[in-house]
Amino acid sequence: MKKRLLSILLVTCVFAAALTGCGGGKQGNGSGTDLSDEQPTPGGSVKVGMTQDLVSLDPHQTADAGTRSVVFNIYEGLVKPTSDGQLVPAVAEDYKISEDGMTYTFTLRDGIKFHNGDPVTTNDIVYSLKRYAEIQGEGSAFSVVEDVKAVDDKTVEIHLNSKNTEFMPQLTVAIIPESVADIGKTPVGTGPFKFTAYTPGQKLELSKNEDYWVEGQPYLDSVEFSIISDMETAFLQLQSKTIDILNYLTIDQTETLKSDEFNIVNGSMNLVHGLFLNNDYEPFTKLEVRQAVCYAINRDEINDFLFGGASRLIGAPMVPTIARFFNEDVVDAYPHDPHKAKELLKEAGYEDGFDLTISVASSYSQHVATAQIIVEQLKEIGINAKIEQIEWSSWLQDVYQDRKYEATVVGFDGTLAPSSWLARYRSDSSKNITNYKSEEFDAAFDAAVAAPDDEQKDEAYKELQKIISDDAVSAYIEDPADFVGTTKRVGGYKFYPTSAWDLSTVYVKE
Amino acid sequence: MKYVLKRLASLVITLFFISLVTFIAFDLIPGDSALTSLGTNATEEQIEKLREERGLNDPLSQRYLKWLSRAVRGDFGDSYQYKIPVTELIGKRAVTTLLLALMSFIFIYVPAIPLGMLAAKFTGKWQDRISHVGSQVIMAIPPFFMGILLTALFGVVLNIFQPGNFVFPTDDLFKSLRYLVLPAIAIALPKIAMVMKYLRNSVLEETGKDYIKNAVASGSTKKTALWRHAFKNAMIPVITFSTMMIGEILSGSIVVEQVFSVQGIGRLMITGISMRDYPVITALVLYVAAIVIIINMLGDFAYRLVDPRLRRQKL
């Protein structure tokens, strides 16, 4: 078994070497095109490729990461995230949090206007927050809001029903005008770009918001998000320069691009990627078996094979880009050790291994490829795994919602609120795909959310990751590297720790 | 006339059954349209609300009757994903696919008919052998790969084609036609080879028959015998094959549309199914079924055109 994997690796290495040989080496431009000695010039337009269609242009309907990344350019909240994971005032100019942490007071930014020319009023803010709360329902993180009211025409107060130190990231929710009835069809926000047109399944066109509150930004006159359902086709379009920016390139693709015509910007996907185990499924009910799986998986091999070693390894459901809360200590809690894995299996009474089905959504080639490597690695300790490829919709229903699965490879995203990454492990969560149940975790989770000061909060979240790691809830692999290919004429592309393809800083060198 | 009416009635009945089967099928396969739309970040309540809004909690029979009562009036509802009327969504794409199909036909028949006849004329000679090998090779290349080859060649190497710059024919006909040339070629190439082979074999079969020998014996030149007499009869199997092929192309060349990013029926079908956009899928299945049935009807009329014996038959 090991031989087979080795030979696959070997062939790929030779192939990769051959490709880099032709491509002329890429090592030099790994860190990005963000060269500060270049002066961005206004004007021009770019086309961004994306392989999935937009789910909804209504910002209050929770959408997938891809859609959120796009609408980031149209809408803004009272506050908005920066590329280094901070929150800065956006629609609001300033804010105050009361001593008891129950009242948030926001002052509206002077002269801020919606794309349709109307000034943003405090009524619009109240309307937006109430609309979002209603759409999200009681179970959401927004349900801590007791009341929102406009104090005067510059000030809005948000009252919480319980203290929540992680409420702030929630306020990135889009502020939209009350006067626009169907926001999904006629998107209007305050972001750097205005909505121009959307052709279902084909493209979304945006144009510059001349009145944007950040001085000098955006640089581009217009932006087009081009929907190309097939990744191979999208890549051809980048090569022929029909599009300027394409995300999620594979390592092979980055090596095919000629370095004198394209730049590769290297960031991270902000995903907790791993082999998720159904803790209610017979062998995985035993801690030793789960630990054995963790020891059996060689994360470095996966990282080298799929990402050229550029991904950052993880050991718990938190990504390294959320640096403050990321627990470095659990990353190597389960180093690759097939011997130990076998011993643990023996202890658990599974000396001869067992059969396992890994369900994977077939449309995500990265998940499928990861699963294929894992199958080989599990064979080494006697677990006879096979892959079942299913459609994404079926995965959502059977695996995610009904939890009828044994193991699955997938990636989960989160927000700047650290609780968003870990909330799905609470025993009573409807999103608890692993069926993990631990009173210790539940209590620690509640304590972490309620932690009054920064220091305690950091510690509490690190502790949560330790609990999950100790319990070997699943085999966490990496936060996958995101290779973004851009044509040479494009500069200023930035990565965010949240779902955002920010084009306000992108410019064209011409 | 009576014949036409009879065929139309059977069309309506078939469509009715197909719509019923589609409804049941999509009720049985796994996947929840509300969950698919909202993804892994939505709250339970949000999903439930959307399910209610789309009427997915109603029993199947009730949903079907509701749909049927609207559909007979030409209202197929709004797309879940795009929130615009399904008829509008399909109409625009059907025009694209129709245009693509027309271009493909021209690219198929213009070379295939003379080539097929030529191959038949030179049976066993080097011309025939070359065309045989050539057509085998072309048929063996799957359309998606042909598509990628063509895009790479014309888009990346020669730089005379901009992959992805598709324009709807309803927006700019000329630009749209220009874009569709390569996709049409990708569809046409393997089919040229097939039509050619069909025609060649069927002409050869006809030329072996007595009436051709008789025609040649009574002074007709070989050329006239081939084109005037054999060609017409040889067309019957070609028509049969063509009706199948036309139906296939008109219902959306899924793969080619995907590779070339052409906004046609095939692509809409794929996204519709993967997003569980039921109003779109149901309408599309009916559209495709109707196309196939109508083309087959036209095929039957075409037989009668080339074969007088069928014309005299009582219906």
Image (tube, grey):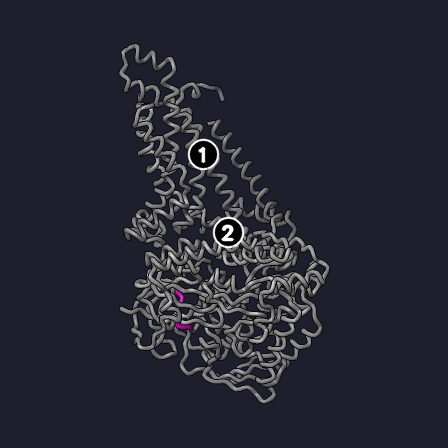
Q: Position of residue B104 (x, y in %)?
A: 36, 40
Specify whether A342 is left or right of A499.
Answer: right
**Magenta span has B299?**
no
For badge 2, the amino acid type reads: Gly
In the image, residue B183 sits, relative to residue A72, either above or below, namely above
Q: Which mark is residue B272?
A: 2
Q: Main secondary structure of the magenta part?
A: strand
Q: Are marks 2 and 1 in contact (CB under 8 Å)?
A: no
Subunit of mark 1?
Answer: B
Magenta-highlighted residues: A191-196
Residue drawn at x 67%, y 63% is A343
Residue lying at the far bottom of the rendered structure? A99
Label number found at residue A298: none
Residue picked out by circle 1? B244
Question: Can residue A181 be seen by looking at this rendering?
Answer: no
The residue type indicated by label 1 comes to Met
Q: Image height check: is A149 above or below B305? A: below
State the image quarter where residue B205 is shown.
top left
Give percent across and percent down for residue A104. 55, 83
Q: What secondary structure is found at the residue carrying circle 1?
A: helix
Q: CA distance from mark 2 to mark 1?
A: 24 Å
Quarter where residue A289 is shown? bottom right
Q: Residue A194 lies in magenta, yes or no?
A: yes
In percent of width and height, residue A246 lies at 40, 62
Q: Quadrant of the C terminus of chain A?
A: bottom left
Depth check: give the residue in front, A188 or A447: A447
